[in-house]
Image: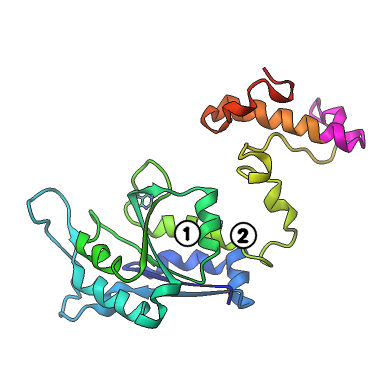
Amino acid sequence: PLLRADVVTIFPDYLAPLRLSLIGRAIETGLVGLDVHDLRTWTHDRHRTVDDTPYGGGAGMVMRPEPWGAALDALVPPEAEATTRVVVPTPSGRRFTQAVAAELAAEEHLVFACGRYEGIDTRVMAEAATRVRVDEISIGDYVLNGGEAAVLVILEAVVRLLPGVIGNPASLTEESHAAEHDGLLEGPVYTKPTSWRGLDVPPVLLSGNHGAIAAWRREQALEHTRRVRPDLAPAALDGVDGVA
Ligand code: ADE
């Protein structure tokens, strides 16, 4: 496979949607190898305990280090350390972006560690980071109950970038956040019919003038990005392309 992914979670069923649709097909065709593991596999007590109360007090529970240590030892043996990246979804990580997705798509082996409760004992990733690359990643400035939904998001964004997963690779360079479009958001899109409920397709799109179409799309993308995500509209583009 181009990419192998191991996911460790206490809710393996949560990752079932990865077997569907585009990622599912990439798995079936062997482009992607996916293994989902139950963290409790690496517990040894009768109750298969994975969490405990936080030292120093406070609300909630913290995941104990022993099962995580054993899981990472099993999934990242010494000979795999150099070629593996451990990804820990957490609201306190660095922000996940299209650039991070591209970075992860270039790896050969990703291990996702899904925390629940108030997080994983800090020593787990401190120790892991002495021998393997560890990346704490947040998919946005909001709090989920655990990392599982974030893994669904991250893997969908990563797998579609692998060569051969998307039928028409041009769609990757024409979409929102594409470097080829200065990271701008995509503007409006239209298909048939040319007139629908009194709303017409902009005539330039029917003109056959590819230069004019590209210029119009660029202008629309800039305008839209400035309106909804001014933080993404590079100041270097101010006054460029005829948009005030
Ligand atoms: N786990 C809980 N909240 C998260 C977030 N915002 N991003 C990634 N993982 C999370």
Q: Nearer the viewer, residue 222 or 82?
A: 82
* Res 127 visible: yes
Residue 68 within the segment the image draws in magenta: no
Image location (x, y in percent) of residue 241:
73, 25
Taking the magenta stretch, the answer to whether it contains residue 199 is yes
Q: Position of residue 32 (x, y in %)?
A: 56, 73
Task: Tell me which amino acid carries mark 1.
Answer: Leu
Q: Nearer the viewer, mark 2 or mark 1?
A: 2
User: Does dot 2 land on a helix, a strand or a loop?
Assistant: loop
Magenta residue span: 195-213
Tell me whether the residue at label 2 lies in contact with that at label 1, contact meaning CB atoms closer than 8 angstroms. no
Q: Earlier in the sequence, mark 2 or mark 1?
A: 1
Residue 223: name its quadrant.
top right
Amino acid type at mark 2: Leu
Does the beta carbon of the residue at mark 2 sit less than 8 Å from ligand 1? no
Q: What residue lies at 41% left-to-right and 64% top-to-bottom? A: 14
Q: Quadrant of the N terminus?
A: bottom right
Disc 2 marks which residue? 161
Coloration mode: rainbow
Residue at the location (51% across, 72% down)? 108
Q: Residue at x 15, y 79 (%)?
A: 45
| Quarter-of-image position of residue 194 | top right
For residue 241, the mark is none
Q: Residue furthest top?
A: 244
Element class at badge 1: helix
Rounded to the nearest angstrom, the CA distance separating label 2 from label 1 is 15 Å
Image-based side of 188 in relation to 53, left or right: right
Q: Nearer the viewer, residue 177 or 78?
A: 78
x, y (%) of residue 52? 14, 63
Q: Is residue 240 left or right of residue 191?
A: left
> Which residue matches tag 1?
152
Q: Quadrant of the C terminus?
A: top right
